[in-house]
Amino acid sequence: MTTTRPSVLFVCVKNGGKSPMAAALMEHRAAGAVEVHSAGTAPGSSANALSTQVVGEAGADMSQHVPGPIDPALLARVDRVVVLGEEAHVDPVPGMRGTIETWVTDEPSRRGIEGAERMRLVRDDIDARVVGLLAELLPGRS
């Protein structure tokens, strides 16, 4: 049986903060209706603890996340690739069916906001974008 669920791959550099946050928030909001993945262009060794904490506050879970690299086969088959931040870059692969878009996310540290307060603002920015993407992927779903 083939799946008709839309699919999305969230990408950032380390795959420890922004992309797993986006993936966890999409998983939470889509409740299984979207196939969700995340990866890094230069994966780190662990998830960001503050990211994990503030995503949990929003009802999503990334506590089991382990950073990983982009799988070219996955990149080719997903419907949407979302690059979070301006530091990561994803080049299309041959036969790629989806589109690549970049979310230039809020960076509160540029305004002197750090710690959990910073991460909550990042989370809220990503979450609002996830809500918009979910509406695109699943039109008519409330």
Image (cartoon, rainbow, N blue to C red):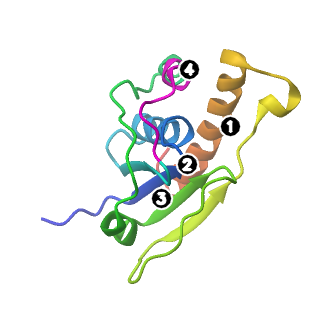
Q: In which quarter of the image is residue 2?
A: bottom left
Give whichever of discs 4 and 1 has the lower sequence position.
Answer: 4
Give residue 13's mark: 2
Query: In the rendered structure, which segment of residues is drawn in magenta?
Result: 43-53
Asked whether residue 54 is drawn in magenta, I would say no
Percent x, y of residue 139: 50, 58
- Please give left or right for residue 115 compared with residue 94 in the image: right
2 vs 3, front mark = 2
Q: Tell me the CA gap for discs 2 and 3.
A: 24 Å
- Using the image, tell me which numbered label, if any, was put on residue 137: 3
According to the image, label 1 marks what residue? 125
Label 4: how many Cα within 10 Å (few below 14, some 14–19, many 20+)? some
Q: How far apart are marks 4 and 1 (CA)?
A: 15 Å
Q: Is mark 4 on a helix, strand or loop?
A: helix
Residue lying farthest right?
Answer: 111
Whichever of callouts 1 and 3 sits on the residue coming sooner in the sequence is 1
